[in-house]
Amino acid sequence: MGGGFLGIFTAHSLATTAELLATVPPWLLTLNRFLLPLLNVCFILGFTWVGFVSTEYLLRFRRLEKPRDGFRRPVYLLQAARQLGPLYALCLLIGFGLEPLLAAAQHLPYQEPARLSWYLLGLSNFDKLRIQPTSWVLAELWAVAAVGQWLASGLLILWLSPRRWWVPLLGLMLAGSLSFQLLHASETLLLKLHSGAIFTDFSIGSLFAVGAAAASNASTENAQNRWRALRFAAMAGLLVLALFQRQWLAVPLLAPAYRLVVSSVCGGLILASFCDNSPAMRCSWAAYGFTWLGRRTYAAYCLHTAAISLTAAFLTHLAEPAAWLLTPISLLLTVGFARVWGGKDAREM
């Protein structure tokens, strides 16, 4: 998941760098055009990962329960709320409080069209469909709100249901999400941002988590080789899907099929990474770095837009070449934010 976040961060930071430059180099425009479809794939990877790790943790939580401890189950939802709540509130404080103050200090006009009530209710992805927020931070909180909606609805249904019903229930959620996308096939914004579309990714991730419960028992060397091969094949598949995204989405009715395919490939990548416990996978510096960032992905995702926005506000007072410092400075700032606010991922809560 750390790699997926880096893809999202790079696309956002380079787009902001282009905005700070008076003359944008052609190579940067080309790079941004390439990163945009990759950004969409990274978002789908992130949502599929949320479905996977939340369901995998719920499976572990229920396995550890004793029959008489059924009333302890609300602890799971409280832990999830503890992960989502404080950072979400901090982002609201930045978007509705800090950024207007910064604008006032610079004598810039600032009028936030987003509605605080929608954000307080966790419905900011619906709000974004109607009004584009001025704040970068608020503009990105639609994704966090969608995660909260999944935890409060889809995952809650699984939590209340017998284990044997999970696959049929997830199948129904997937069918409902695909139906929603077909009904709105010509509305690009709905297909990208609405929870009804994103539930495809959550459901696919959850289905792979159910499969992982059995697959993770296979730890032979041959099995590890198969997981490694699957992981590399899935990574190559995601790159190909990103490259040909425009062709897929040129036909509106193919958009739901594209999302289904990308989510499934992401699920395979997550499953292979989850089940590959070989020493090489655990000990490499790259694996350690991505794992460290992955454990703090929620914090990094929430706050990277604030880091980019604050860095851009600072760099506007410097000479134009300083704009190229935006990506490294905002990345360091994001890592610092994630270190302070980030905690354990859903598998370690």
Image (spheres, rainbow, N blue to C red):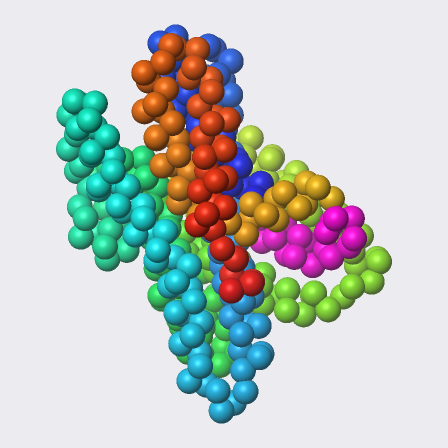
Instruction: Give the residue at x 67% y 70%.
Output: 214
**Coordinates of residue 262 in the picture (x, y in percent):** 54, 45
- Please give the range of residues in magenta: 265-283
- Per the picture, the main secondary structure of the magenta-coloured stretch is helix
Residue 19 sits in quarter: top left
Question: With 103 as the anchor, is 270 left or right in this view?
Answer: right
**Side of 286 relative to 134 (left or right):** right
Residue at horizontal 70%, vertical 65%? Answer: 216
Residue 96 vs residue 261, the one in the foreground: 96
Residue at 66% over, 38% down: 236
Does residue 150 show up?
no
Left/right placement of residue 266 relative to residue 102 reads right
Q: Is residue 83 visible?
A: yes
* Residue that extends furthest to the right in the rendered view of this protein: 221
Q: Residue at x 50, y 33 (%)?
A: 332
Across and down, in percent, residue 237 comes to 63, 40
Give the camera-side residue of 291 and 242.
291
